[in-house]
Structures are given as C-alpha cells and as structure tokens.
Image (cartoon, rainbow, N blue to C red):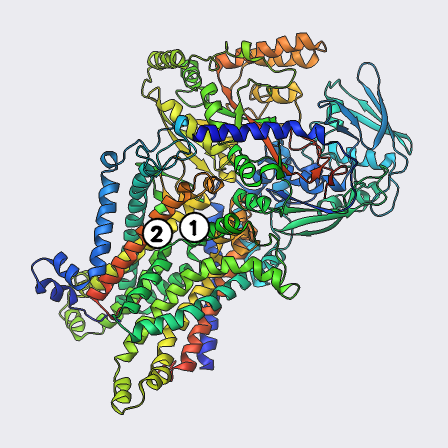
Amino acid sequence: MAVATPAVAEAASRTRNPVLAFGRAQPLGAVSLVAIVAMMFGGIFAELVAPYDPLAIDFGSMLAGPSIEHWFGTDAFGRDILSRVIYGARTALVIGFTSSFIGSTAGAIVGTASAYFGGRLDSVIQRFVDILLSFPIIVLALVVVAVLGRTLVLGIDVNLIFAIAVPILPKVARVVRAAALSVRAMPYIDAARAAGYSHLRIIVRHMAPNLVAPYIIMLTAYIAQAILLEASLSFLGLGVTEPTPAWGLMLSGNASDFFREAPWMILFPGIAISVAVFAFNLFGDAMRDWLDPKFKL
Amino acid sequence: MKRTALALISAAAMLAFAAPAAEAQTPKRGGTFTFAISAETPNYDCHGSDTYATLHFSAPFYSTLLKFNLDKYPEVTGDLAESWTVAPGLLTYTFKLHRNVAFHDGSPLTSADVKATYDRLRDPPAGVVSTRKATFADIDRIETPDPYTVVFKMKAVNAAMLEHFASPWNCIYSAKRLAEDANFPKTNVMGTGPFIFTEHVKGSHVAGKRNDKYFRQGLPYLDGFKGVFMLQAAAMLNAFQGGQVLAEFRSVSPAERDRLVQAMGDKVRIEESSWTLNLLVVFNVEKKPFDDVRVRRALNLAIDRWGGSQGLSRTSTLRSVGGVIRPGSPYATPEAELVKLPGFGKDINAARAEARRLLREAGVPNLSFTLHNRNLAQPYTPGGIYLVDQWRQIGVTAEHKQFETSPYLAAMSSGNFEVAIDFSNLFMDEPSLGLAKYVSFDKAPQNLSHAIDRELDSLFDKQVRELDMKKRIDLIKAFEKRLFDQAYQVPLLWWHRIVPTNKVVMGWKMSPSHNLGQDLAEVWLNQ
Amino acid sequence: MLRYAIHRLLLMIPTLIGVAIVVFFMLRVVPGDVVEVKLRGDGGNVSEETLKLERQRLGLDKPLIAQFGDWMIGLATLDLGKSMWTDRPVIEEIGIRLELSLQVAVMATIIAVLIAIPMGTLAALLRDSWIDYVVRLVTIGGLAVPSFWLGMLLMLSLLTLFNWLPPITFTPLYVDPVANLTQLIWPALAVGYRYSAVVARMVRSSLLEVLNEDYIRTARAKGVFENIVVSRHALRNALLPAITVIGLEFAFLIGGLVVTEQVFNLNGIGKLFVQSVSRNDFTLIQGMVMMIALFYMLVNLTVDMLYAAFDPRIRYR
C-alpha cells in the first residue's frame, strides 16, 4: 500500500514538462492519453465536429449503410450514427468524469476522516461502507435510478450521475482509509497535533498531500467503470433516455433487430464504448505505474 | 437501394398475409406448440386482469360464455353457450349451455358455475379483485331455471352487452371451488378449456396438455403447448429465427418483421391488421399555458401524422392515422373527412404556420415544457422522439422524460405532468368503450387531461342510446370534431399489429386485438 | 481464528440491519406502487376503489412505520414475506432462479481461473516481453468490452453463421447436462472474458511483487531451479490477492448478471431484479437485496479465512 509517496514531486522534477515525462515513461499511457484527448475534443466541440444534428430525423435515409455522407451509416430514424457517437462521447465523458469525481472525492474525504479521527466514528463509518459495499454496483444504481427518477440539468441526468457515484464511494473510502491510516501513524502527525494545530489544518496540510497519489489513481480508474456502468444502465433503459445520444442507449431497443441489414447500428456504439473504456483503463494503469507502482486497487 | 429492399420485404409480407386462404388443408393431430409471451402474468385470475399476459397464459385452459368469431369479426358466437336469445328491449339475455362440458377435475359444468362466475365478476367478495365490476354493474340478477339455462336480467340497457359476454377475460370458474375459496383461480388453474394445465415455471414458461374430454368433438388438435416468457424482443427474435418458438401473438415491430422475413424467407408467415390500441397526446389543462386552447391547438397542428405514419410505420408499431375510433372499424371516420379535422390535414407547412401564429397570439412563441412518457421501446419511445422533433419545427422545446411503468402511471393519475403520451388499449371496437376516455374528467377518471366539457358529455350520452348506426356515426363525428377543436387530448397514431407465425402453425386466426382468439383449440402443426 | 470468525459473523448483523433499513426507506420514496402497475399497466380502466382494496390487502395502506415494523419483525423471524406481484413467498421466487445464476457464476469462475492464472503468470515471468504486452492488452480489452455487447455479438454470430441457437428454457445440470451446458456456456463465456481479465491482471501484478521480495531472491541465489521457485514460493503467495478478486467477482456475479441475463433471456436473479424494480415489487426487491448482501458478506468472510489459512504471516486478533 502507498505510504507517503513522494512520487508526484519526484516525477515532476525529472523534467520540466510532466506530460512529456509521462509519455517517456509510459508509452502505452501516452497513446491512451491521445485517444482520451481526441474523445474530449470531439465531445466538447461536438457541434463543430459532428457532420449532422444528432437528433434530426430523416426518414428518407433510414438504415443507410456507411457512405461518404454518413460514415457510420444511419439508424432506424435516419439519424446519423457518427454524429450520435460523437455527441455520445460528450454524454459518456460528462457522466464518467463527474460521477467518478464525486464518488472518489466523497470517498476520499470519508476515508481520510475515518482514519484520522478513528475510534467510534471510524467504526460507524466502516459499517456504512460495509452496507454500501454489499449492494452490488449495478443493483445499487438500478435502485437509485428507479427511486430518484430523472432530473435533467443541461440535458444530463443528475440522478444518473449520483447513481453511478454512490457505488464508487465506499470502494474509494476503503482504500483511502487504509492509506490514510499509515500516514496517520507517522510521527510528524503526532507532532502536529502536539503543536495544537486544528484537525482541519492537519488533514489538509499534512495528510492530504500524501493521499493525492491513491486518489488520482482511483479517480482515473473509476472513470472507465463509470462509463461502462452508464452504458449498461442506458442499455437496460434505466440510464440516459431518448433522444439524447448515448452509446449504451444506441445498443438497446431494436438496434439488434437490424443486425443483418444494418450491423453498423450495434457495431459502432459498442466499439465506441470499448475504445473509451480501454483508453481510460490503460491511462489509469499508466498513472498507477507512474505515480505508485505498488498501489493496488 | 435500401428502400427497394424494404419495399420488397413489405411486398413479401403482404403476399404472406394473403396466403392463408390458399392453405386450407385437413388438420393434423399431435405435436407440442411452443410460442413466446412477452410478459408474465402476476397470477392466474382472468377476472382481476386487464393484460394480455394473463390471457395468452390462461385462455387455453378456460372457456367463456360467448366469444368473438374471428372469421367475421366483430360478430360474436357461442363458446359454452350453445344458443342464446335476447329479449326485445335488451333487458333479458337467456343462454342455453352445452350439455357435455366437464371441468378438468371431472365435474360437469352447469348454469350454477356460470352464475357464480358472473356474480364474482360483478360483485367480487372481499379480497377478490374484479376489474370488470363496472362493466357488469347493469346486471340486476342472474337466474338458473335449470342446470343448462342461465338468464341475465338487466337493470339498464347496455347496447354492448353481448360483446361483453364475449370478452375473453370472463373465464368460467367452478362454483364449487369458488365457494371453497373465492381466490382459488388466482393460484390454481382449473377450467373447461381445450388444454389442461401441467406446469408453470416462474420466469420461464407455462405448459398445458390436451384435454381429451373437451366438449368440442375432435378438438384440440395439439398434444400440448408451451408458452415461453421472453421479455427481450431480441431474444425472442433469435429464438423465432432458430425455430425454437413458432409464434408471438401480441405483435412485433416492422423492423423485427423484416428481419424475420429476410432471415426465414417462406418459413415465416406474417399477418397484419390495424390494432385496437393507440397513443394519445394529453395536455394537462390544469397547468399553464395548456389551459389555453390556442396552445393546445397549435401543438396538435404541428404534428405531421401522415408523414410520421409513413416513417414511423417502418420501424415502430405505430401506423394508422385515425380519429377516436380504430381505422378499419365501421364506426371510424373515413380519410376524406378526417383530413378536414385540425391536425389531420395533409398540408403540414400551412398547419405549422398556423401553429406558430397561434402560439404568438397566445404569447408563448418559444414555449418549452416536458413531455412525460413511458419507458417502453415499442412504441412509446419512437412516439416521443417523433413528437419532440415535430414541436422543434415550430420553435417549441419539449424535453422528453421517460419513466418506468410505476412512476409513469403514478404521475399520470395524479396529474403531475404538463404534456404526456397516454395510451388506450381496448379489446374490441365498441365506440362507447373508445369514446369514454374523452368524457369530462368528473365522469371519466381515465381522462387524464382533467378537462371538463359538457358538450362532449352530451354527445357521448346521445350516441350510447342511439340504436340507428348511421345516426350514431354522425354523433361520433360531431364528438370527434368538438374534441379536436378543443384538443384536450388527441390521438397520435394507431398501432399496427404484426403477428409472425412459423409456416407450420395452422388454424390460428388474426384479429385487431391481441386479447382475442387465444384458446388454441383449433391450432395445429403442419409437420 | 475461530474467535475471529465469530467476531466477523457477529459484525454482519448490524450491517445487515443497516442494509434492511436503507433498502426499505429507499424504496418507499419511489412514486407509484405495484398495485397501479398490476391493474393499470396495460390500460385497464380500474376504479380507485379497487386499487384501494388491493392496497389494503397488501398492507400498503398502513403507516410507513407499521410497514417498517412488519419488515423488521419478518427479518428477525427469517420471514421475507410474499412478493407483492405474485403473492408467492419471496424465498420461493428467489429459489427458482438461484440455481441458474449460481451455475453461470461458477462456470464463469472456472473459465476465468483456467485462462487467468497461466496468462498472468506468463506475463509476470516474461515481464516487458511481447507476451507481457499482449496479455496486458488482452486483459485491458476484457475490462473494456461490455459483456452484454459481447453477448449480443456472440448470439447474433451464432445465428448468422451457423443458424443455430442455444436452448431457450433452463434444464438443470443433473437432468440433461448437454442441454444445460449448451444454454449456459455462452453467457459464461461472455462474462468470463471480463472476469479472467480482472483475475489475470491481479495475478500478474502480485506475482511481480512477490518476485521482488527477499526470500525469492534468496531462493534464487541458492541456485534452486527457477521453475521450482516460481511454483513453490512465488505463485503460492501471489495467488492470495487473486483469490480475493475471484471471491469478490463471484459475489458480484450473483446479482450482477443483470444485463447479460437480459441479452440471453436467462431466468436468473438479475432478470428477476430488473423485473421487480420495474414493477415496484417492494417485498421482492427487499428480499433480493438482503440475499445478495448476505451472500457478498459470506464470500468476503470466506476469502479472508482462506487468506489466514494460506498465509501464515497473517494473524488475526
């Protein structure tokens, strides 16, 4: 387990440009980074990149195969699949990033607090973590989505983000707590307490810097999981809803009916999910190897 | 090129539809017939159910008093009743029962069983759910002068009574069993139908074997049947294509049909019909600005039903443009008159210009609201996607929100929505059934727009009493005109039923309702 | 060790109670209820009075606190109640589906272990060789490809290429092993790929770690034949983290086959879960969550016990 890793500082000092240093040390990671940046570019500038309006229905060209006009073909409503895949990247990234960020951050705070204060608070928190952990991820998300229904903010379902973030929380909390316990045992923490510093100051100034590495590793690793979970929920009809472009949703409904006459309908969104998750996993691995090779999820 | 391919498929499908007449052959006996059911019934009691899931499961085990003659739909014919008479004035119905009918436990069927069944339907004892209590509220008393005669005395005239006696949900139960436990049929299957219940594996399938003592000589042809629950359409199609299931009796979508035809060629038979179901757009008149008739009218005008029908009918079960009555029914308004009604015109550009004008006049040119919809792939999702697109074209932003069945229904019945997609599901074309949904909210709670309109109410009451068909049709047209002018709730499109059966399946009959004709007595396998 | 096991078992009780409380109140926030879905879901024109009577029968009209009391008392007497949809005991509903889900989980585990351990070991021994790179890419691929998509492709290619499909209804293994295996091997493969990827990655990384430890270096320096070193010392210790992962994934599969069961139309726990959620069948959802949670905790405990048994360095208080 990670103990007071100076890797971040060390890595940064190796060269002026951390991106270059990362690329040199982790070539696979660099490749995945390129894929992620491309995906982000597509997602952010979807309006400029996508050749068509992803919502525009055109019964005149429904189920058209890949062609110059429609590179990935069209779906049962004549909507351009390439455009929907590009806009789908936005959905996946927004949901993936925010839910992983919320889940990991909340988990890290809970884990650190649990380790630092110890005692009764620690056991109470640990019971809560146990409770959350014993709900399987997808079951938990199913219940949360069914319970909260759907609340859209800027076209993105905030309850869905919450549903995906909740199962991430206990996993991160448990790992960060373990890391934080080792930091807590360091003499300088006792020294700081003896000096009468406030709890908040000790946590933020002395403990947090040593927990950044596991936090970042978990954060990147769970982006991939969050994207996958969003796709699964949307496939089940419990995630993103039509007509919002989302990869999992594009696979659901009648998409597989058209396997013979329009295989592109299930191929491209599936590939998009796989590539995105692949890239984030690879990047997560690379981050781990770079920041803290001994860290285990 | 794609289009030609599709056109070819549709042509093939049409040909297949025309084919059955030519296939008349002597039925063969034997074999087990496996078909798919896309939902699983919560329990076995027909009386407390309104879903085909119960019928496709239990219809083969039961008989009813009358049934619809699917060769001459909507005519009714006898099932347990050998003959019947209706007294002039429609206040007395007398049924003579077949004499050789036995329940699966061996006991003979008598008029007491019919009486017990209808008493349970119209006045269920405590703890029993009858969803047809209101339907039979007009029955005053039921008499059984002898074991094979049942007499229904009515309190009030109900022109649709015979059709109700033919309703597939009125399974006849054993009086003895009901006396022992009023909820016996909920957890046990024991009827007089062509098949005897053998097993129900939860989540998997139901199975039945031939009733050798079935009262119709020589029937059923099959040795047995197996109804497999297949909730995912994709899984069902795979199994159909692989020959593991031989039919799906509710409906498949056009895309699913095309896939089956393409993959199976002449091994699949496709039968199509307009369907007794439709989708409606409901405006909640208790929410602003939908209390303003101009807004409702504008949103109705913006929907290109003819264009939508053409496009949507190729991928969804939505198809026929129609008013309040199923197109194809003798009571339906013909197309030539329909196009004169608001929202049904063929010049969509003019309609949209008018819609924009109305919205400006109402002071909401950039209206935005949420469209409440059910989260079901067919045909709710395509319907919702299409509406959002149509309204976008007059500058209106509709946010499409889909819910699971439970929260969807809860919001609908509590009026917690602005605009919603509602549906109606009738098992026959009787106009009073269809029109009831549009009557004022204080009289018909199923009117989810919460509108109160006495003019509609009075037209409705007049057509119920009108015995002359021609005059009745005129009243229905007047009703329709008033309804579409006010646009509290308007039909979007009627559904289209597409039933695929494997070519080996014979003797099953197509109808405009998926609730009818599922006892499988005359089905046989041509193997 | 026995005291530790008892301590852990006792700790499960408050956690289970917590799960019971959380799931109960979570569900009551859902708008609508099972009665409406059952009687109005297919367009039935049912009166409010009928709905009220049915709610009364199911006890849904009682105050929340009374319903909660019933639930807790039921739990204490090991009675999960009856499904609100079918009126059958929850235990019975779950029991029917458990065999299938367990079997798929076991088969996927076997597939995963058979693939993962050689792959992970090879990759670790030949670190940074091309084999290692291939293994890493294949395993990351396993994490990336959604198993439901893999399942869809699998079914559709079987159908398109061979015009053949696995059986559609479940036959227990002891009744007809061939029919049983031809149905379940496909979902097991679709899930097993991801599963083996998770395990292989764990085997590789923990083996690498162990290979760097002092006692292995000592053994090597003593000239013991390298293969023996790997098999006797390193692999044995490296397997411990792999066991953890296998255990956790296995527990996850019992309730986590949700999407895969949909694709393959399997009558398992996951499908039942989706159905009961869409029907608002509170009692059944509650019962399933309790069962899955209990299962997860027991698997976790077993894994920890195995840890203790395998690794003498670990001592429990």
Residue C91 lies, in percent from the top left, at 61, 58
State the mark number for residue C149: 1
Q: Are marks 2 and 1 in contact (CB under 8 Å)?
A: yes
Residue B16 in sight from this viewpoint: yes
- Please indicate whether residue B286 sits to the left or right of residue A279 in the image: right
Q: Secondary structure at mark 1?
A: helix
User: Which quarter of the rendered picture does the C terminus of chain C lie within?
Assistant: bottom left
Check the image and report above or below for B111 versus B283.
Answer: below
- Please indicate whether residue B309 sits to the left or right of residue A244 in the image: right
Task: Give me the chain letter of mark 1.
Answer: C
User: Which quarter of the rendered picture does the N terminus of chain C lie within?
Assistant: bottom left
Instruction: Pick the residue in front: B325 or C18.
Output: B325
Q: Which residue is mark 2?
A: A274
Residue A199 lies, in percent from the top left, at 20, 63
- Please indicate whether residue C171 sits to the left or right of residue C12 in the image: right
Q: Secondary structure at mark 2?
A: helix
- Which residue is at a point 21% across and 51% down the rendered structure image? A34
Task: Give me the chain letter of mark 2.
Answer: A
Disc 2 to disc 1, C-alpha distance:
10 Å
- Which residue is at a point 37% across and 70% down the rendered structure image? C119
Instruction: Pick the residue in front: B104 or A106.
Output: B104
The amino acid at mark 2 is Ser
Q: Residue furthest bottom?
A: C222
Instruction: Pick the residue in front: C165 or A4.
Output: C165
Instruction: Pick the residue in front: A178 or A196.
Output: A178
Quarter of the rendering containing residue B271: top right
State the mark number for residue B410: none
Check the image and report above or below for B375 versus A295.
Answer: above
